[in-house]
Image: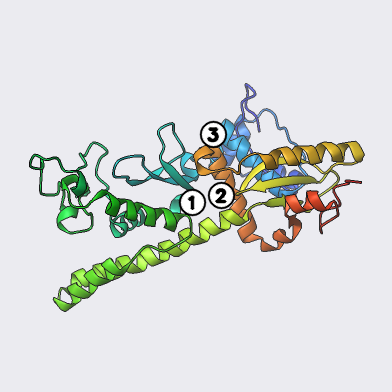
Amino acid sequence: MLGPKGELLYVGKSVRLRSRLLSYFRSGVRGRTADLVRLTRNITWELLPDEFGTLLREMRLIRTHRPPFNVRHKRETAAIYLELTREAAPRLRRVRGPSPRSGTLFGPYPPSVLSDDALRDLVHTAGLRDCPATTPVEFADQLPLLPPARTRPLCIRGELNSCPAPCAGGCDEEDYRRRVKAVENLLRGLETLPLHPLRTRMKRAAEEENFELAATHRDRLERIQELTAQLHALADELERLDFLYLPDSWGSSPRLYLVRRGAVVMSEQLPEGREAWKACRKGLRGALSRPRPHPSSMDADTGAEVLLTASWFRNRPQELHRTTDPVAWLAEGSGLSPLPAPASR
Ligand code: SF4
């Protein structure tokens, strides 16, 4: 829906466009819808062959043009990433996407999974520091010959043993690196965090009859177990979102989508005729020869698309029957249901 100067006011999608538009113009509409109708001078539409492509197109238009009457998909923080910073003693922090100084990135994640509390639990359990980048780091095995600048941690976390205090020679570099590696393995879906230090603290608090502290440790333990399960499921889900997808089409001109690690890296009309198939195969081979999308090369928009694709297949597992391995499909030169043969003969 376009305004007086042709500016985009609102983007929507519908399988019944006529009734959807009539609902906007029906007398009695109030609030934002009434404002939208009052400002609209023109309506333009495009016909798309399937619901998946329609969702993607809608999201891309909204994120590019930011129409004032759209709410969904507009937030910058539609997807977030976790970064292990590139520092002597790396920190784990949330970021919106890669930057030239990025360390190792993981994700994308829905913001709801990684609240402030969840991130704090993770950092405290893993024993990573969360102080500013400017905090001086002095590992135990790197202390100068002269007496160390400081022997007491710079914050309470060091006193409480939730941080090994690399700011005051509280640990050596290898010990800190081990902790970073454990977080890296967790975020890759390979391992869980070692939870025995937290269990020991909980047990000790209970033995000392400090039941409030024991309950705090127990709650954190439960939260971290839940978060670990979620992070593993997400990592696993993204790894599996790698296929060629032919969704059911509403009319003619169905589209093929090449999905790699959740990102739609190629989308084109299902070819008709030998030459079109040849071009399609060439395009597919080219797309497959490029590296799989990685968080370090994804911007906020791609991250949002990956989450959209993940939620599409999570909510419609039957759609996975319409996917196939693109490498095998190209190599075999035969139709793998539901895709037709790639016309290699
Ligand atoms: S104890 Fe030292 S290294 Fe750890 S968070 Fe506090 S200031 Fe940072």
Please identify, in this view, whether the residue under mark 1 or under mark 3 is nearer the observer: 1
Tell me the SS state at disc 1: loop
- 342 or 30, which lies in front? 342
Mark 2, Cα crowd under 10 Å, few <14 / some 14-19 / many 20+, is: many
How far across and down, in percent of the image, does residue 21 sit? 70, 42
Q: Earlier in the sequence, mark 2 or mark 1?
A: 1
> Which residue has dot 2 on it?
307
Please, what is the three-letter code of the amino acid marked with disc 1?
Pro
Label 2 to label 1, Cα distance in Å? 7 Å
- 170 or 163, which lies in front? 170
Q: How is the image coloured?
A: rainbow
Tell me the SS state at disc 3: loop
From this viewpoint, is residue 72 visible? no
Q: Is residue 67 left or right of residue 16?
A: left
Name the disc covering residue 68, or none. Answer: 3
Tell me the SS state at disc 2: helix
Q: Are marks 1 and 3 in contact (CB under 8 Å)?
A: no
Residue at 67%, 28% in the rendered image: 41
Seen as rendered, the residue at the extreme front is 145
Q: Is residue 3 left or right of residue 182?
A: right
Q: Are marks 2 and 1 in contact (CB under 8 Å)?
A: yes
> Which residue has dot 1 on it?
110
The relative height of residue 59 versus residue 172 in the rendered view (above or below) is above
Please, what is the three-letter code of the amino acid marked with disc 3?
Pro
Please, what is the three-letter code of the amino acid marked with disc 2?
Leu
Label 1 to label 3, Cα distance in Å? 23 Å
Residue at 85%, 51% in the rendered image: 333
How far across and down, in percent of the image, does residue 342 sit? 85, 48
